[in-house]
Amino acid sequence: MKNSLLFLIFIALWFNCFSQTYTPPSDPKVTANLAQWGDKKFGLFMHWGIYSIPGIVESWSINSEDADWIPRDSTKNYDEYKKWYFDLNKQFNPVKFDPTIWANYAKKAGMRYVVFTTKHHDGFSMFDTKQSDYKVTNAAVPFSLHPKANIVKEVFTAFRDQGFMIGAYFSKPDWHNENYWWPRYATPDRNNNYDIRLHPQRWKNFKQFTYNQLEELMTDYGKVDILWLDGGWVRPKATVNAEVLSWGAPIPAWDQDIDMPNISKMARAKQPGLIMVDRTVHGEYENYQTPEQKVPEKPLDYPWETCMTMGNAWGYVPNDNYKSTNTLIHLLVDIVAKGGNFLLNIGPKPDGTLPEPALQRLTEIGAWMDINKEAIYATQPIAPYKTDNVCFTRSKNGSIYALYLLDEKIKLSSKITIKSPPKMPKKLTLLGVKSTIKWRKLGDNLEVILPVGIRYLKHALVFKLD
Ligand code: FHN
């Protein structure tokens, strides 16, 4: 008896260690919203804050960790630099800010949801919070006098008016808040800088501050569909796993538990069906996973979204190196063929406009989506997902698409091969072309004779296999 009980305990522990890191939502409203979100496929991520003024990395340069990806003006000592950074709020004045222009470009690009930074790690709130004076609507900020000073409200309204699902990015850590980075002590790394076990009231105060700010965002800013929580090192210590250790940051001896059950109960009371993304913490408050700056090798059997910068930086930096339209469309196709969503990030400039190269890419992506969107929206993956440079998708009515990725540097031949398509079609069409397409079966492959005069079809040819 004793041995079989021990064996059962061993199996349960083993399974728990290696079981999926995904917990499906138990609330049917969340499940329904997740399905709606999954059909949208393409979203706009926006990092905008005081870091956009000098055009530097968002928040991280005030963190003391010594990492090559955290550049800092080394002519200033740390305390001087930190004061300089935190004082950037006094220069924030994006006089050309007009989120309807942003929303129009994003919609024309085929984007259908937005995730906007309400507050990044630096603690500067881009909304009229009552919990802190470190906010865009405070008199110290030149833009506070502008009629559109409550930026989050303006952005959410403009994109919602264009039919977008609305996502609120919110940083769990707040490096400006005295109950996260207590001014009594140095700030050696990204974590809170005091032992919570010795100062429980201070962490209790921070939990309440965080709860109150999230309650404002869930109450006063209209319908919010996604709560996208960043700063995964703020988590129950018991959830620290290999992924967290891979970040190379110190792991405190105490718990930085922000009380997600309490936050979730409030947030979903205010926003029924709210999709919650407690990034990298996994569990019941991470309704989808968010591989960052990468695309999984294979389809994943749970909801996921690749978040990626259009350039190299999340916030605006001058002369950023933007990915080509061809690359961006190929990323979108690859992600969708594997069952994911593509959350593509643009950092607005300090004057409130979007960088020209970003606008050009949004326009070009939109031209491709205008012709080929039926192979993207509301599709599901279908084996073999991708063979060579061809990705496959399947629409809800059963239509199958082969998306043949074009290399801009190689002249397209008159005959192409689609290897091992999910099925041999009775009829083959090329989206954007009225003439019939000639093809023949070659073993398991499809050989297609391309019609002449299709040079206007760029980036990927999309065949419909009926
Ligand atoms: O630390 C942040 C980073 O600054 C940026 O906001 C990205 C966007 O996904 N999230 C965190 C890093 O994973």
Image (spheres, rainbow, N blue to C red):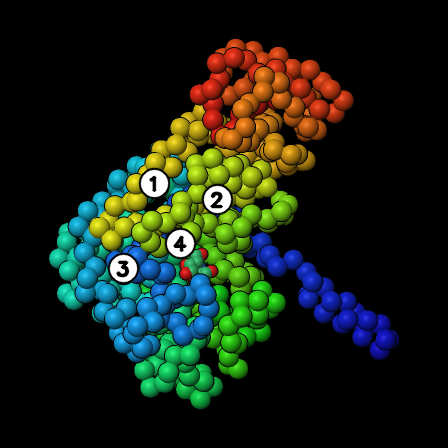
Considering depth in this image, is 411 or 364 the residue closer to the camera?
411
Alpha carbon of mark 4 to alpha carbon of mark 2: how far? 17 Å
Asked if the residue under mark 2 is in contact with the one under mark 4, i.e. CB atoms within 8 Å, the reply is no
Q: Secondary structure at mark 1?
A: helix
Callout 4 crowding tier (Cα within 10 Å): few <14, some 14–19, many ≥20: many
Give the CA separation, mark 3 to mark 1: 19 Å
| Residue 72 appears anywhere in the view | yes
- Tell me the kind of residue under disc 4: Ala
Q: Amino acid at mark 1?
A: Pro
Residue underneath mark 3: 54
Distance between mark 4 and mark 1 Cα atoms = 14 Å
Quadrant containing the N terminus in the rendered view: bottom right
Q: Please tell me the numbered disc located at residue 313.
A: 4
Three-letter amino acid code of the residue under disc 2: Phe
Q: Going by the picture, which residue comes out furthest to the left?
A: 145
Location of residue 411 with respect to 172 vertically, above or below: above
Give residue 48's position: percent from left, percent from top: 31, 55
Residues under numbered marks 3 and 2 in contact, where contact means CB atoms less than 8 Å apart: no
Please name the residue shown 30% across and 72% down the image.
Answer: 75
Residue assigned mark 1: 357
What amino acid type should be assigned to the residue bearing mark 3?
Pro
- Say if mark 3 contacts mark 1, CB within 8 Å: no
